[in-house]
Image: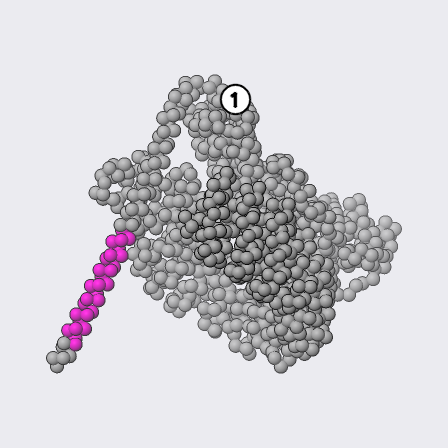
């Protein structure tokens, strides 16, 4: 009830009646009333309009009334809290600019201790955002104490949130405060609860980046080593990413002593999750440690990951094969690939797990550019061919979708004999998504294989897709035709495609007749005025008498679509009468689309 | 331990048949492949034939023999070795279970080592990333023929009358327990069943580990709720907790209350609630029966996390509320009746008939009905509007007749109040509509105001800019004129 807002706030209705005597008085009352509403949606709406309220209140009353109110009433549903946490990140101007930005800290501090992760993360994000708007003095007076309070909170949630705030205030505070911050971070890295250690481990790299090099060496390394040998693998795996960041910060000569022992250990961790993480970050790691360590350490480690006993790890490593090879030092790249990597890759081609094979298939073609023509023909081609015959469609598809890399090196002809059966099989795959994927590569394949090969082998496939029983496939097939015409030209279209497409206009199935119209929509522009007027338009006109209303209103839509291609005489004398007839059709949809076409083409 | 409160599939589609039938898969952990060299096992003499003097020595040798691991994915590999180990394990189980005086001090470290080597392993990745415990068959542990016997041995070991906690605690330590808890994530239900019983015994016998075990279970749950949403053993852990809660001393320690409010209640938000809801509701009711003052925390917590879109979960929540109301103290009921019956009213107006039906069933419960009757003055006004409206609007005949019954009950309870509410129903409706209009009006005005403020702000800043520019130009003009004059 609006009139029972409580003491201190005047009833709204009287304010409303008092017109604009002092309209700045009611927004807070509105908010309070709305925030107490039983309907969450209404509470959510009012929080989302918080900036409206603040703006109406003005900066001073926002600081003195709105923010304290919000700080005191944070006991709502997480969804409302999330919206609040987000809003407050953009509130600096509404409280009076950077000078007053610290007023936003109390509500955000409470939000950063909430249980729900999304709310907390959003509060931390907003805190990070407004930390940059603090002056160095305010940062030490207001912001840093908040971080300290969170870091020593009772419940794990506040300590987790603190982990994300150290790195934003560290660079801009005095050296005494810096020492305190380092100490707090250290404490959290050995926290009792794994949740906090995970949060600390995930922020370790970020924190290392803002530290002075001496402290990276003295503090961060020991923390990294400890987290990387935590009893819980969920902590250890987060340390891997931190290790990569730390490695980029250290001078080359310190890497071996400070980070490599730990990273080597991670690559052989007993938990597959940690090894997976190493595989997943392998390219970054390679860049971070440089060519020498790569040659001596990472190559054998990578071989082991490619041969790992868990498929998850092998798949992650297989994904990195191309990138790893690309980034090998040039002087020894070919030797390393040929003697160390390729033997593992060969084994992966016949892996027992399809995810591993398909991960490999998505990158293996990239090796041909690195190894050059002769090696590709001798060593890689057999692998490509084997994968093209793989039982799993995803593997074949990944090979086909990366043909362009091979095309540049050895030309596609080498593959075409194996390619064709693979394409045909994928084109008829029982899963429509697989068919859709192969259709999308058709224009590319057509370009690489040439018009003759296409006409001979693939054209019939493209036409078959037009009558697929899944609409998405028919739709993709029409789009495919348009792209083919763009490649091979209008004349080719007129000879090979257009007759077949127009022939479908007499099909007993109305869905196929509609496909004719969809093809015309797609093709008219690329085929040009002459073909459209001479060959397509008569068919469209004829279809305006179709007995199925869906076909008739698609005729109207088609005419609207191809109108711009036609000359004005044709529009006036031929198209207009047809549309007018359709506009008086007994079906309301046909009428609607005919009228729309008339008005769009300005034929009224 | 199938959950008893399991909502029926309501859409009528046979989901399982729509999916590709998955055959039972088995997987084995990667631990086997880490064992460097494969040792050939040779059969040892039988324990029962051993002279007493050599019995312990032989027992120890058998334990060591059982530390060898075998590849079970390759089902024909080293069949002889597998059989020797199986027989040895069987003997060990038998011996611990039946004969007295076998468990002497030097055997403790050997036994715990054998158990650790066999059961502790990083669980393999789930082969089905979208594994749905309700729909899919779990992947079974391939090495179960051995693993089961190791678990059986461990259980007999703990249950043996010779078992001495003071000796065991040196080997069954915090690190051991932590690894044991991680195994609860196993997809294999047989393994989790053993783990449940074993952890229960450990908790019962090793008093020094109790607080640690509770804390680690907390961590597992918190991670499950807020980080991963995946952990296969939630139901089993809750079952153990159910019996632990039963044994809590009164008054409840704040640690235990915190566990209720910050862990058990938030567990209700999990997507996979249906898998462990029965065990969870049992724990919650246990808490209430221990200490009635936690009732308000529980009810308000459940109301806070009330499902908004998942009707299947809503039905489970209603079931739990009924379990709670079954044992609620009348004084506690009064404290929560208002928010509670607002939610129940909302459920009654759910278009999903199972939700509405589940809520209306409360009126069939004698005890709840008596609570409602005692507080009719408060409750009837809360639900009347909904009952009245839904009785005219609901699509489902069963719901309508259930509502008529409820209305009839109320009429008999307090006919005067009932008549008053019926009479004022229309007026109340109109008031609501008016309030809605007023709200819209308020926001419109507020937005106008914002518009005006924004406008005046931009104007002000524009004016200021103009003013500054003018000042600048006059300044530079005066500067140039000053320069000219010199």
- Please provide percent x and percent y for residue A561: 49, 53
Front residue of A194/A355: it is A355
The chain identifier of the residue carrying mark 1 reads B
Q: Is the magenta stretch mostly helix, strand or loop?
A: helix
- Please provide percent x and percent y for residue A199: 51, 58
Q: Is mark 1 on a helix, strand or loop?
A: helix
- Name above or below for residue B309 compared with residue B29: above
Asked if one can make out residue B15 in the rendered structure from this viewpoint, the answer is: yes
Crowd tier of the residue under label 1, counting other residues whose Cα lies within 10 Å: few below 14, some 14–19, many 20 or above: some
Front residue of A389/A70: it is A389
Name which residue lies at 59% across and 61% down: A494
Magenta span contains residue A184: no
Image quarter of residue A238: bottom right
Q: Which colour scheme is used?
A: one colour
Q: In screen coordinates, is A400 left or right of A40?
A: right
Q: In which quadrant will I find the C terminus of chain B? A: bottom left
Q: How many labels does the image show?
A: 1
Front residue of B284/A24: it is A24
Asked if one can make out residue A161 in the rendered structure from this viewpoint, the answer is: no
Q: Mark 1 points at which residue?
A: B405
- Name above or below for residue B86 compared with residue A417: above
Name which residue lies at 67% across and 70% down: A412
Q: Write the start and end of the magenta stretch as one range.
A: B453-480
- Please provide percent x and percent y for residue B296: 47, 36
Q: In which quadrant will I find the N terminus of chain B? A: top right
Name which residue lies at 45% across and 55% down: A569
- Name above or below for residue A434 compared with residue B353: below
Front residue of A416/A334: it is A416
- Name above or below for residue B433 compared with residue A467: above
- Please provide percent x and percent y for residue A591: 48, 42
Image quarter of residue B472: bottom left
Name which residue lies at 52% across and 72% down: A248
């Amino acid at each position: 009830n609006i009139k029972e807002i409580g003491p201190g706030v005047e009833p709204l209705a009287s304010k409303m009646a008092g017109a604009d005597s002092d309209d700045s008085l009611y927004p807070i009352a509105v908010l309070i009333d709305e925030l107490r509403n039983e309907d969450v949606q209404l509470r959510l709406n009012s929080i989302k309009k918080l900036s409206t309220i603040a703006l109406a209140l003005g900066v001073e009353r926002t600081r003195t009334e709105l923010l304290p109110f919000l700080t005191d009433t944070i006991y709502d549903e997480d969804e409302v809290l999330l919206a609040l946490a987000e809003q407050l990140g953009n509130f600096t101007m509404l409280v009076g600019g950077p000078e007053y930005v610290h007023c936003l800290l109390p509500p955000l501090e409470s939000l950063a201790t909430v249980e729900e992760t999304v709310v907390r993360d959003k509060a931390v994000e907003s805190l990070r955002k407004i930390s940059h708007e603090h002056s160095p003095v305010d940062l030490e007076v207001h912001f840093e104490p908040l971080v300290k309070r969170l870091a020593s909170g009772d419940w794990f949630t506040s300590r987790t949130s603190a982990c994300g705030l150290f790195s934003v205030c560290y660079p801009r505070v005095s050296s005494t405060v810096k020492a305190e911050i380092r100490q707090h971070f250290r404490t959290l890295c050995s926290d009792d609860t794994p949740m906090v250690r995970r949060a600390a481990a995930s922020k370790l790299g970020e924190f290392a980046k803002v530290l002075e090099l001496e402290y990276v060496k003295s503090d961060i390394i020991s923390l990294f080593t400890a987290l990387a040998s935590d009893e819980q693998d969920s902590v250890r795996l987060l340390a891997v990413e931190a290790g990569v960041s730390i490695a980029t910060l250290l001078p080359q000569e310190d890497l071996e002593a400070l980070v490599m022992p730990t990273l080597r250990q991670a690559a052989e961790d007993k938990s597959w999750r940690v090894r997976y993480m190493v595989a997943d970050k392998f390219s970054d790691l390679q860049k971070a440690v440089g060519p020498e360590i790569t040659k001596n350490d990472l190559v054998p480690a990578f071989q082991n990951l490619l041969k790992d006993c868990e498929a998850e790890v092998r798949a992650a490593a297989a994904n990195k094969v191309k990138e790893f090879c690309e980034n090998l030092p040039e002087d020894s790249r070919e030797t390393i690939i040929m003697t160390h990597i390729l033997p593992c890759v060969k084994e992966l081609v016949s892996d027992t797990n399809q995810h591993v094979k398909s991960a490999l298939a998505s990158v293996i073609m990239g090796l041909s550019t690195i190894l050059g023509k002769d090696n590709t023909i001798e060593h890689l081609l057999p692998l490509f061919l084997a994968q093209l015959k793989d039982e799993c469609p995803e593997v074949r598809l990944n090979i086909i979708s990366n043909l362009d890399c091979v095309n540049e090196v050895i030309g596609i002809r080498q593959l075409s004999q194996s390619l064709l059966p693979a394409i045909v099989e994928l084109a008829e795959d029982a899963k429509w998504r697989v068919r859709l994927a192969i259709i999308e590569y058709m224009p590319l394949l057509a370009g690489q294989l040439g018009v003759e090969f296409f006409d001979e082998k693939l054209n019939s496939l493209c036409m078959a897709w037009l009558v697929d029983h899944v609409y998405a496939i028919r739709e993709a097939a029409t789009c495919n035709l348009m792209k083919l015409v763009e490649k091979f030209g209008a004349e080719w279209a007129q000879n090979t495609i257009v007759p077949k497409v127009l022939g479908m206009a007499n099909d007993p199935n109305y869905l196929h007749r509609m496909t004719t119209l969809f093809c015309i929509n797609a093709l008219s522009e690329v085929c040009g005025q002459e073909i459209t007027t001479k060959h397509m338009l008569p068919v469209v006109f004829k279809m305006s008498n179709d007995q199925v209303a869906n076909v008739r209103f698609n005729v109207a839509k088609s005419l609207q679509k191809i109108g711009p291609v036609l000359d004005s005489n044709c529009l006036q004398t031929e198209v207009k009468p047809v549309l007018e007839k359709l506009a008086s059709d007994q079906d309301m949809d046909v009428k609607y689309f005919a009228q729309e076409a008339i008005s769009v083409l300005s034929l009224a | 331990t199938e959950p008893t409160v399991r909502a029926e599939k309501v859409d009528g589609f046979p989901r399982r048949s729509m999916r590709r039938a998955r055959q039972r898969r088995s997987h084995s952990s990667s631990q086997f492949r880490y064992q460097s060299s494969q040792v050939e096992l040779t059969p040892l003499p039988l324990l029962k034939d051993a002279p007493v003097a050599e019995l312990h020595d032989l027992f120890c040798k058998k334990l060591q023999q059982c530390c060898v691991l075998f590849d079970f994915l390759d089902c024909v590999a080293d069949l002889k070795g597998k059989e020797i180990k199986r027989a040895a394990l069987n003997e060990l189980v038998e011996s611990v279970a039946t004969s007295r005086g076998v468990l002497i001090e030097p055997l403790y470290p050997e036994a715990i080592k054998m158990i650790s080597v066999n059961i502790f392993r990083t669980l393999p990745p789930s082969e089905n990333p979208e594994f749905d415990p309700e729909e899919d068959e779990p992947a079974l542990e391939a090495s179960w023929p051995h693993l089961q016997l190791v678990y059986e041995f461990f259980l007999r070991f703990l249950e043996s009358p010779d078992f001495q906690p003071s000796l065991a605690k040196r080997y069954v330590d915090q690190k051991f327990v932590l690894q044991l808890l991680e195994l609860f994530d196993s997809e294999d239900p047989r393994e989790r069943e053993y783990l449940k019983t074993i952890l229960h015994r450990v908790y019962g016998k090793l008093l020094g580990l109790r607080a640690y075990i509770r804390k680690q279970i907390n961590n597992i749950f918190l991670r499950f709720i807020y980080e991963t949403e995946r952990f296969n053993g939630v139901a089993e852990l809750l079952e153990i907790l159910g019996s632990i809660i039963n044994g809590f001393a009164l008054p409840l320690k704040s640690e235990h209350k915190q566990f209720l409010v910050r862990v058990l209640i938030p567990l209700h938000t999990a997507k996979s609630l249906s898998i462990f809801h029965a065990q969870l509701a049992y724990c919650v009711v246990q808490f209430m029966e221990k200490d009635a003052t936690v009732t308000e925390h529980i009810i308000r917590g459940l109301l806070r996390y009330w499902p908004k879109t998942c009707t299947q979960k809503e039905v489970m929540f209603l079931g739990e509320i009924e379990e709670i109301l079954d044992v609620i103290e009348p004084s506690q009921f009064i404290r929560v009746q208002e928010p509670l019956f607002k939610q129940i009213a909302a459920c009654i107006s759910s278009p999903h008939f199972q939700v509405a039906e589940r809520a209306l069933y409360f009126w069939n419960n004698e005890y709840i009905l008596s609570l409602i009757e005692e507080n009719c003055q408060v409750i009837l006004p809360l639900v009347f509007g909904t009952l009245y409206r839904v009785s005219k609007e609901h699509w489902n005949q069963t719901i309508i007749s259930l509502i008529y019954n409820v209305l009839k009950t109320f009429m008999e309870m307090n006919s005067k109040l009932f008549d008053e509410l019926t009479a004022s129903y229309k007026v109340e409706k109109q008031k609501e509509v008016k309030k809605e209009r007023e709200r819209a009006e308020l926001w419109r005005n507020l937005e106008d105001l914002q518009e005006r403020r924004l406008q005046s702000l931009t104007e002000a800043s524009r004016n200021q800019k103009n003013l500054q520019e003018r000042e600048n130009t006059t300044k530079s003009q005066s500067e140039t004129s000053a320069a000219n004059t010199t």
